[in-house]
Image: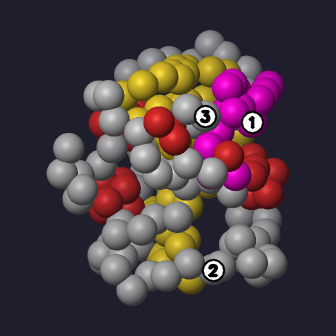
């Protein structure tokens, strides 16, 4: 998969986000998911510690060092989707849940326990424990969940969940 292309997991569940709805991309990096949702007609907010490489014309971009005591920069704001890929900072979990509107979609994908056998990240602080994303989504409607080895190169945990009771209409 080209680095500039949206994750297949994110692309698969992007149609669940309310048409024209707002999307928050946490740790947006170069902006690949910001651009993907902008192309779908969504209002997009991207947050990252360093926006120097972020390319997402039309997105609201916020520089915030969330791991070093900087407060959550979006208190009270709610989004129709929260997207997180290749990033884990457990103290953010409550803010991510609070930022998700009723009926909003959480799309999360990052490295999990066992990834050290394939390289970095290898520190437990940066690896999800078994089932940890399911715990994050407790009380939400789980649309899809995966936990395993991907292409013999990484251990990944993935989740798509909707904030609210199900069932939801799958697209």
Q: Position of residue 79 (x, y in %)?
A: 61, 54
The residue carrying mark 1 is 136
Residue 160 vertical position relative to residue 7 in the rendered view, above or below: above
Task: Report helix, strand or loop for mark 3.
Answer: loop
Read off the residue under disc 2: 64
Tell me the residue that label 3 is attached to. 113
Image quarter hosting the C terminus = top left
Identified at 52% across, 41% down, the residue is 116
Residue sitting nearer the eye, 105 or 29: 29
Range of magenta residues: 125-139
Q: Look at the numbered disc 1 and give the secondary structure of its residue.
A: helix
The image quarter in which residue 14 lies: top left
Question: Above or below — where is 24 with respect to 135?
Answer: below
For the residues marked 1 and 3, what is the alpha-carbon distance in whole angstroms? 16 Å
| Element type where label 2 sits in the image | loop
User: In the shown orientation, is residue 129 left or right of residue 36?
Assistant: right
* Residue drawn where x is 70% and y is 52% of the image: 125
Q: Residue at x 61, y 34 (%)?
A: 113
């Amino acid at each position: 998969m080209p680095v500039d292309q949206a994750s297949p997991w994110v692309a698969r569940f992007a149609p669940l986000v309310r048409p024209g709805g707002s999307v928050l991309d946490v740790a947006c990096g170069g902006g690949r998911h910001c651009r993907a949702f902008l192309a779908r007609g969504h209002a997009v907010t991207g947050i990252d510690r360093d926006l120097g490489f972020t390319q997402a014309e039309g997105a609201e971009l916020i520089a915030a060092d969330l791991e070093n005591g900087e407060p959550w920069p979006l208190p009270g704001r709610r989004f129709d989707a929260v997207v997180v890929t290749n990033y884990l900072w457990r103290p953010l979990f409550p803010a991510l849940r609070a930022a998700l509107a009723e009926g909003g979609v959480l799309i999360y994908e990052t490295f999990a326990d066992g990834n050290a056998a394939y390289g970095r990240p290898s520190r437990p602080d940066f690896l999800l424990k078994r089932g940890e994303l399911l715990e994050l989504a407790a009380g939400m409607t789980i649309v899809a969940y995966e936990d395993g080895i991907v292409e013999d190169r990484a251990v990944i945990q993935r989740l798509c969940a909707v904030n609210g009771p199900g069932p939801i209409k799958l697209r």
